[in-house]
Image: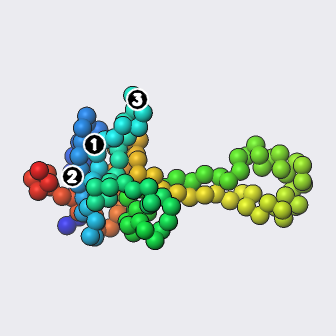
Amino acid sequence: MSITKAQWAAIETELKGFLPTVNFKLGDDEINISKVRASENKFELGVFINGDIKGDWYLGEKVRPACIEQVWKKKTKAIYSPKRIKEIEKAWGKRLAKKEFTNLHDKITYHLPYFSKASILVRQFKKIEGLELIPKKETE
């Protein structure tokens, strides 16, 4: 059963609260969302898969659940900063820089289990097919 617009609004409101917990079901995995401490005065929404966030999941695709790409936040980072690219192109010339530094303009993509705002999390989760909300009564 898909999640209605009213339910998404209620989920977002709850996630903006002090100590929220929302549970979803995606295939065989249970997705738990709760607030976690990021630093001394900062909290973020953590996305736990079957109650865990494991360090192994960052390293390889073989050992991690398949749903990570859907439920974790996608981040991209350039291999070289724009300042460094300009320095390399100035020193080597554009043609030689592209030849010697084949990954000069490439980006690295990775996923993080933390969201800074509830609206960002809800926007991403709305796009997931087959996501089911687990009512509070079943989890308590």
Q: Residue at x 28, y 45 (%)?
A: 34
Q: CA distance from mark 2 to mark 1?
A: 12 Å
Q: Nearer the viewer, mark 3 or mark 1?
A: 3
Q: Quadrant of the N terminus?
A: bottom left
- Of the pair 124 and 74, the residue shown nearer to us: 74
Image height of 72 relative to 118, above or below? below
Residue receiving disc 1: 15
Of all residues, the one furthest to the left in this rendering is 137
**Amino acid type shown at disc 3:** Glu
| Residue 99: image location, x then y, percent | 84, 64
Residue 113 percent across, percent down from the top left: 41, 51
Q: Which residue is mark 2?
A: 7
| Above or below for 39 versus 117 | above
Nearer the N terminus, badge 3 or badge 2? 2
Tell me the SS state at disc 2.
helix
**Residue at horizontal 79%, vertical 60%?**
101
Quadrant in the rendering for residue 29: bottom left
Q: Which residue is mark 3?
A: 40
Discs 2/1, front = 1
